[in-house]
Amino acid sequence: MKTVTQYVIGIILVCATQFLTAQENPNSLKIEFLENKKEQVQNQEKEFLKESVASINAKLDAGEITSEEADALKQTEAEKHALNIENRIAILDNKIALLERNEEVTSDVGANLDGLVISIGKGEDSDEFDKGGIYIGPKDKAIPKIYDRRTTSDMVFAIGFNNAIIEGQSLSDSPYKLGGSGFVELGWAWKTRLFKNTNAVRLKYGLSVQWNKLDVKDDQFLTENNDVVSLETSAFKLNKSKFRTTNLVVPIHFEFGPSKKIERDTYFRYSTYNKFKIGVGGYAGVNLSSMHKIKYKQDGSREKDKETDLNTNPFVYGLSSYVSFGNVAVYAKYDLSPLFKDQAIDQNNISLGLRFDLD
């Protein structure tokens, strides 16, 4: 018990000492903050100088300036940031002196310590590479921009009409309804600039899930006999006859089109915002699942049959292309792989719709 009492008394004395110290100098925390700020100022200006030198070196490598001009620009930048350090630390010293002399100071000294930055969304200098977001924290800890970012990413969503190209038939003779058959695609894509000094060609690649639906017409349904899939006509009226596949694919496109070069003091970007783009490529992947659903009435009762194994081709591959302006594109894809591993008549899935790159 005696030991516990000693500990409690010790804690009380420590707290009392801190309280008295705070009463003696009510601005001590603010002064400590400003003292630490001096080192942050030096580190920040050094980082700014590194970024400026990197920008000058990039212009030198591109042949935009001579070696002598580069050296002169570097000297100017070094002098500027040295003066920035000197001036900014002088401002901090003046604030510290005011806080040391006065128990109460005006709000422009005591409250505004450049301590926190709150940033929501994109700034006025943002481009397609800037995703925006929320940042709350010390200004000097904010993540600096990368000088040359060649890769960006976005979510891809596509939707439209779906059908099948059948050997010896045109789309107008298709056994699948043009209006009732559709597709949806959802995925994530990365876009990388292929060349160092031009953005004329980009490689767009990613991972997507594709849902393809075929609405069978004329009371027909898909059936499998001895592993061979074919269409048969039902003996009674079908209220619904739909076949759906779900595929996981890796799409790859070469993207062409103009872009705008955005140059800042510490970084540059190529932006295709509101620009015309053409993508040509393809995709490959696996079939995750398939289902054939039939609904009908028999003897006055409603019946529903589901078939989940129709000898669907386990591997999927095909060609795809898009033509877009801004973030909206006309999108087409065609499966080179047959819909089924063994089928009475070859049929390949085809889709046409709209694609949205949601960056």
Image (cartoon, grey):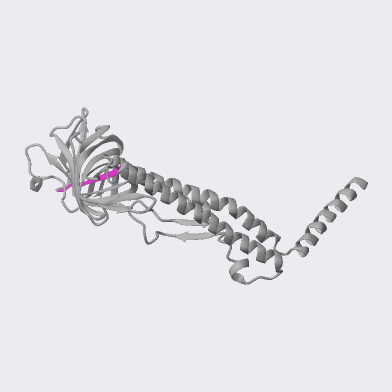
Examine the image and state in which quarter residue 13 appears: bottom right
Report if residue 259 lies within the magenta region: no
Principal secondary structure, stretch drawn in magenta:
strand
Q: Residue 275 in the image: x percent, y percent?
A: 22, 54
Residue depicted at 7% across the width and 44% down the height: 170
Q: Nearer the viewer, residue 79 or 110?
A: 79
In the rendered picture of this protein, how many numbered marks are placed on residues? 0
Q: Which is more toward the observer, 222 or 332?
A: 332
Please provide the residue range marked out in magenta. 209-217
Residue 151 appears anywhere in the view: no
In the figure, 134 relative to 66: above or below?
below
Q: Picture coordinates of residue 266 (x, y %)?
A: 39, 51
Q: Position of residue 1 (x, y in %)?
A: 92, 47
Residue 39 to residue 291: above or below: below
Q: Position of residue 41 (x, y in %)?
A: 54, 53
Q: Quadrant of residue 340?
A: top left
Q: Nearer the viewer, residue 292 or 121?
A: 121
Residue 59 shows up from this direction: yes
Which residue in the rendered view is the most extreme toward the right? 2
Q: Going 82% across and 59% down the picture, which residue do you hit? A: 16
Q: Is residue 201 left or right of residue 94?
A: left
**Left or right position of 296 against 105:** left
